Amino acid sequence: MDAPTSNSQYNWVWKGVSNPTSYKYMSNQIKTIWVVLNGERREVPEGLTIATFLSHLGLPEGRVAVELDRQIVRKTDWNSKLVAEGAQVEVVHFVGGGRA
């Protein structure tokens, strides 16, 4: 599919991140899904990986652990593991402490 030459009818959003030759466009109506984040139901854009999910929420990737559907997800898998409809996500922040 070629890139549209005009956006007068739709607001187009580029979705092909890693491969600039594969064009995927979507209209200005972004599909959303419902997930549960730390016990709270939230609506988020469809198609997020764990890494983009954290970014969407404004959460830093450093010093956090992520559990997806009761399974701990290794940081090396964050870019490939998708957050699906109804997912149970737990994000835990590590906090330093101890004696000085």
Image (cartoon, rainbow, N blue to C red):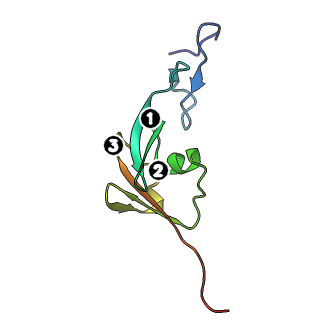
Q: Tags 2 and 3 in contact by the CB under 8 Å rule? A: no
Nearer the viewer's eye, disc 1 or disc 3?
A: 3
Amino acid type for the residue under numbered disc 2: Ile
Indicate the position of residue 5 as horizontal and vertical percent values: 64, 9
Disc number placed over residue 86 in the picture, else none? 3
Q: Residue at x 56, y 36 (%)?
A: 17
Quadrant hosting residue 62: bottom right
Q: Which residue is mark 1?
A: 46
Label ID, residue 32: none
The Cα–Cα distance between marks 2 and 3, rounded to whole angstroms, is: 14 Å
Q: Which mark is residue 50?
A: 2
Up the image or down, 11 lies above or below 69; here it is: above
Q: CA distance from mark 1 to mark 2?
A: 12 Å
Say how many tags the image has: 3
Residue reaching furthest bottom? 100
Q: Position of residue 9 (x, y in %)?
A: 60, 7
Q: Amino acid at mark 3?
A: Gly
Compute the Cα span from label 1 to label 3.
11 Å
- Viewed as shown, does residue 62 lie left or right of 80? right
Q: Quadrant of the C terminus?
A: bottom right
